[in-house]
Image (spheres, rainbow, N blue to C red):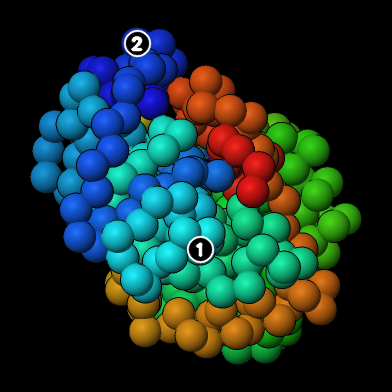
């Protein structure tokens, strides 16, 4: 298992804050419990928030316990008729090779997963929590209208990739930012963004954004916070919408960035709304149907960054927080 060892104050360090330890698993299933063989698990930015000794919307990690999050697994022992041996499920599991899930709590059966052309890891990204996040928040909070301009930050990431491609489908002009030239090439050439820039180069973020969106922006899909949010408020048009999904530039620092131009919210009548993915469970049906068919029909693509084996997970997690991932960060533990 990957064990949480210590609360970080800035970027977590593999081996210091999270490390691999072998633990014998004694399996004594009670009624309704299942034993899972984990195949993939997800590495997500919100997990950094669980490494704090403070209350948040998801319970914190416990020192000395395995890290946990969404995974895809196979049921290999079962005392629950709804989850017979061999069922493929997604749900909240551990960063570990095997997990016992009391009462099979929160597990979702992935019907047809063995035969499906869709890879299992997709249920952690484009067809999982980040995908639902992108799909529902863009529609419900963004209220996009054809012809408008959207700016997406962390655009080559799990959420950003889908937001940008949905934006194109909806007839928006799509502008993105990312932290490397390779990611910017991918946005322009593969995802067909109208414009994209590397926020680490060629002047300030504001200068880059003004070049990429000279007419201003109607919607800002906020994944980053800090200087990027400040720049977005500056170029936003009247009645703009900010979909406040995340602010990853603020997760690993003790010195929060002070946004200097919040006054634009008043004069431009900007609406800025935050949310958490679970607010949108009601959209799950429409999401699975739409995004599933777009994938099968190759109307959208996605990229993932797969770390191999549990031993690689601490380093891969820290790397994701630093932008070393190119696409949705997942860990593969075993083949089906
Ligand atoms: P990503 O796949 O986008 O991975 C994180 C990316 O963030 C990195 O690859 C890096 O890309 C970028 N990043 C890291 N540090 C910085 C920084 N200082 N400045 C700018 N960019 C940075 O992760 P997700 O798509 O899963 O998540 C994206 C955002 O969405 C996060 O803020 C996350 O918290 C939020 N989120 C919120 C949810 C909700 O329910 N509200 C649900 C899911 C995600 P780069 O190379 O471009 O810098």
Tell me what residue is drawn at x 78 percent, y 37 percent: 181
User: Alpha-carbon neighbours of circle 1 within 10 Å: few (<14), some, or many (≥20)?
Assistant: many
Q: Nearer the viewer, mark 1 or mark 2?
A: 1
Residue 235, position in %: x, y? 55, 62
Answer above or below: position of 93 versus 10.
below
Q: Indicate left or right for 19 with 62 as reference.
A: right
Residue 215 in sight from this viewpoint: no
Residue 315, position in %: x, y? 52, 21
Q: Does label 1 point to a residue whose CB lies under 8 Å from ligand 1?
A: no
Answer above or below: position of 13 versus 125.
above
Tell me what residue is drawn at x 19 percent, y 24 percent: 63
Q: Secondary structure at mark 2?
A: loop
Q: Secondary structure at mark 1?
A: loop
Answer above or below: position of 32 versus 268.
above
Report the front residue among 187 and 313. 313
Tell me what residue is drawn at x 52 percent, y 87 percent: 286
Report the front residue among 74 and 85. 85
Residue 17 in sight from this viewpoint: yes
Tell me what residue is drawn at x 47 percent, y 59 percent: 85
Mark 1–mark 2 Cα distance, whole angstroms, equals 36 Å
| Res 118 → quadrant | bottom right
Q: Which mark is residue 271?
A: none
User: Alpha-carbon neighbours of circle 2 within 10 Å: few (<14), some, or many (≥20)?
Assistant: few
Q: Indicate left or right for 52 with 252 as reference.
A: left
On-image quarter of the N terminus:
top left
Residue 184, position in %: x, y? 76, 46
Earlier along the polypeptide chain: callout 1 or callout 2?
2
Q: Which mark is residue 16?
A: 2
Q: Which residue is mark 1?
A: 87
């Amino acid at each position: 298992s990957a064990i949480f060892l210590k609360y970080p104050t800035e970027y977590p360090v593999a081996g210091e804050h999270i490390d691999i330890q072998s633990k014998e698993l004694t399996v004594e299933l009670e009624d309704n419990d299942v034993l899972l063989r984990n195949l993939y698990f997800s590495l997500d930015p919100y997990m950094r928030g669980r490494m704090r000794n403070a209350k948040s919307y998801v319970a914190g990690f416990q020192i000395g316990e395995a890290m946990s999050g969404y995974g895809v697994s196979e049921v290999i022992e079962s005392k629950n008729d709804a989850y017979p041996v061999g069922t493929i499920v997604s749900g909240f599991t551990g960063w570990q090779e095997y997990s016992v899930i009391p009462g099979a709590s929160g597990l979702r059966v992935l019907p047809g997963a063995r035969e499906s052309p869709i890879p299992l890891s997709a249920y952690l990204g484009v067809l999982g929590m980040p995908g639902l996040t992108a799909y529902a928040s863009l529609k419900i909070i963004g209220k996009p209208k054809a012809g408008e301009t959207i700016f997406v930050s962390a655009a080559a990431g799990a959420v950003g990739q889908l937001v940008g491609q949905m934006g194109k489908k909806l007839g928006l002009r799509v502008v993105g930012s990312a932290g490397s030239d390779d990611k910017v090439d991918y946005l322009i050439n593969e995802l067909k963004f109208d414009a994209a820039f590397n926020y680490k180069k060629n002047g300030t973020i504001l200068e880059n954004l003004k070049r990429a969106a000279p007419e201003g922006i109607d919607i800002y899909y906020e994944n980053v916070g800090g200087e990027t949010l400040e720049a977005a408020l500056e170029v936003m048009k009247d009645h703009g919408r900010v979909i406040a999904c995340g602010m990853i530039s603020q997760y690993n620092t003790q010195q929060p960035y002070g946004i200097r131009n919040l006054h634009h919210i008043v004069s431009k009548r900007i609406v800025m709304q935050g949310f958490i993915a679970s607010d949108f469970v009601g959209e799950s049906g429409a999401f699975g149907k739409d995004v599933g068919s777009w994938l099968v029909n190759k109307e959208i693509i996605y990229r993932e960054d797969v770390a191999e084996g549990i031993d690689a997970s601490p380093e891969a997690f820290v790397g994701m927080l630093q932008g070393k991932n190119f696409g949705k960060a997942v860990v593969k533990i075993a083949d089906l």
